[in-house]
Amino acid sequence: MNKSVIDLNECTNCPIRHRAVCARCETDELEQLESMKYYRNYSAGQTMIWAGDKMDFVASVVVGVATLSQTMEDGRTQMVGLLLPSDFIGRPGRDIAPYNVTAVSDVTVCCFRKKPFENMLVTTPHVGQRLLEMALDELDAAREWMLLLGRKTAREKIASLIAIIARRDNEAKSAIPGGQMSVDLPLTREAMADYLGLTLETVSRQVSALKREGIIELEGKRRVIIPDIDVLMDETGDDSDGGPLI
Amino acid sequence: MNKSVIDLNECTNCPIRHRAVCARCETDELEQLESMKYYRNYSAGQTMIWAGDKMDFVASVVVGVATLSQTMEDGRTQMVGLLLPSDFIGRPGRDIAPYNVTAVSDVTVCCFRKKPFENMLVTTPHVGQRLLEMALDELDAAREWMLLLGRKTAREKIASLIAIIARRDNEAKSAIPGGQMSVDLPLTREAMADYLGLTLETVSRQVSALKREGIIELEGKRRVIIPDIDVLMDETGDDSDGGPLI
DNA sequence: CGCAGAATTGATACATCTCAAGCTGGGTGG
DNA sequence: CCACCCAGCTTGAGATGTATCAATTCTGCG
């Protein structure tokens, strides 16, 4: 179990206050949420929720990284979501979890008891509106991911993954396009493989290839330095236009 | 241009009244929607919306089948959505279309002017609530699709596609599990390939293989007869439990 | 220091893609 | 009415990218 450093009791101090499902709430709504919330901590590697589990809560990731994944009977697994701080877990109106949720790093989540949360969706407007926005964003991400899974080569997949994480990481930091940047991959090679629909060996080979060609550099196994983000973007197979960020 | 047989002016007569974005609306909300709606028809094969187009409306599919797809610069394309009657097109809060929308059969859509529709989302509850529900359903479908794209074999992909369409087709008809059923594939081999992340040749070969083994039968190129749905399900790679339908 | 998990690298197998050649069936115009 | 045409489909042979199986080599940590 990890211990949170932040004072989490006050929503106003919450690090995800302005991006999570509560982002649009007025103070009275926030109080209502506060009355149904509680925190849970998970340590790296731990399975937070098993597919098939009964869910009596929904939650927001406050700190850490988690994954959503599906497993077939013979063990093949596919990651179907990467949950970063402010991302939402669970679905109103359903009480059996359809996916495994696994903590990649130490994770803290802010849970809301399901029933009161569902009531709030019908009695107040702002939680539902924000949740809709977030669901549509995730749907877009899922569709981009489908293109990656269905049509990209292993090399393009790796480049895309690094680019996606770089973008998310530096989103708030107003990065300089074309400049150097560095990224912490929060995932093991195996998790990357599950994300990309590859084997871990193929991931390793392609990372090595990108390194050999100078498109990325490695500091340890997890930290990636991108000398020129535009060169990396050329390897993703994506349109060069459409804006380098966002 | 196709001509609609149904009287579409009255929402109460609308074939998708109870499943579309308007499903939960009270009569006053319905009147409001009625005042901002208009119909459009497209003929089979026509591109309804190009990625990058400005969208000044959102819409519901009333009749027909359409696809959502993404294309890479070199022409590789991946379908990212299959739109059947009652499915929703567009996204409140965005005015550039991110995907191509193509009519597979003749299609009729019920369009809502975007601005009034967006206003309605904040002033009345039921459209937004239904839209959230639909978005979450689509997200689930997208995630199942990701497993298919990332981890299933060509044979499993084909079997899954037929099973998915069979399920959707017979959803309302309360089919007998284990019994024979027949399905119209609304898609060409190429569209199936784009759906599944395969080439059309591979699709053709796998369909032939399933036919050769008696798992499916063909009437013409498009109509599929499934002698035993359970046998087909065994080929999808999915868990056998979890209920054959739903 | 040495272990265990993580990652790399190599050799080979195999599923799917690619390129190429026919087939089929429904529509059309002579 | 029939031959032709053409998009959609099937089938074949060979190429290729990724998976699989199998050693090593790192690296962080007790």
Image: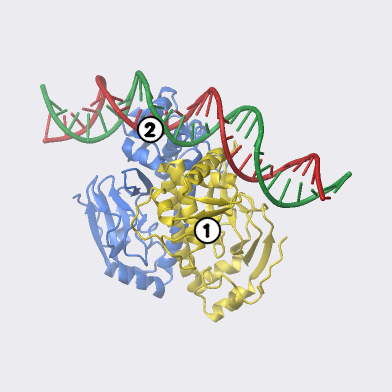
Chain colours: A blue, B yellow, C green, D red
Q: Nearer the viewer, residue A169 or A52?
A: A52
Give the x, y percent position of residue A179. Answer: 47, 33
Q: Residue at x 60, y 69 (%)?
A: B116
* Chain letter of the residue carrying label 2: A
Q: Is residue A172 left or right of residue A220?
A: right
Q: Name above or below for residue A181 compared with residue B242.
A: above
Residue type at mark 1?
Ser
Judging depth in this view, the residue of A38 and B201 nearest the camera is B201
The answer to whether residue A91 is seen in the rendering is yes
User: Which label is found at residue A203?
Assistant: 2
Q: Is residue A142 visible to us here?
A: no
Where, quadrant-wise, is the C terminus of chain B in this rendering? bottom left
Q: Amino acid at mark 2?
A: Val
The disc placed on residue A109 is none
Residue carrying label 1: B182
Q: Quadrant of residue B228?
A: bottom left
**Vertical relation: A83 (above or below) D18:** below
The image position of residue A67, as x and y in percent, is: 33, 48
- Using residue A67 as the reference point, say whether residue B119 is left or right of it: right
Q: Quadrant of residue B139?
A: bottom left
Q: Mark 1, chain letter?
A: B
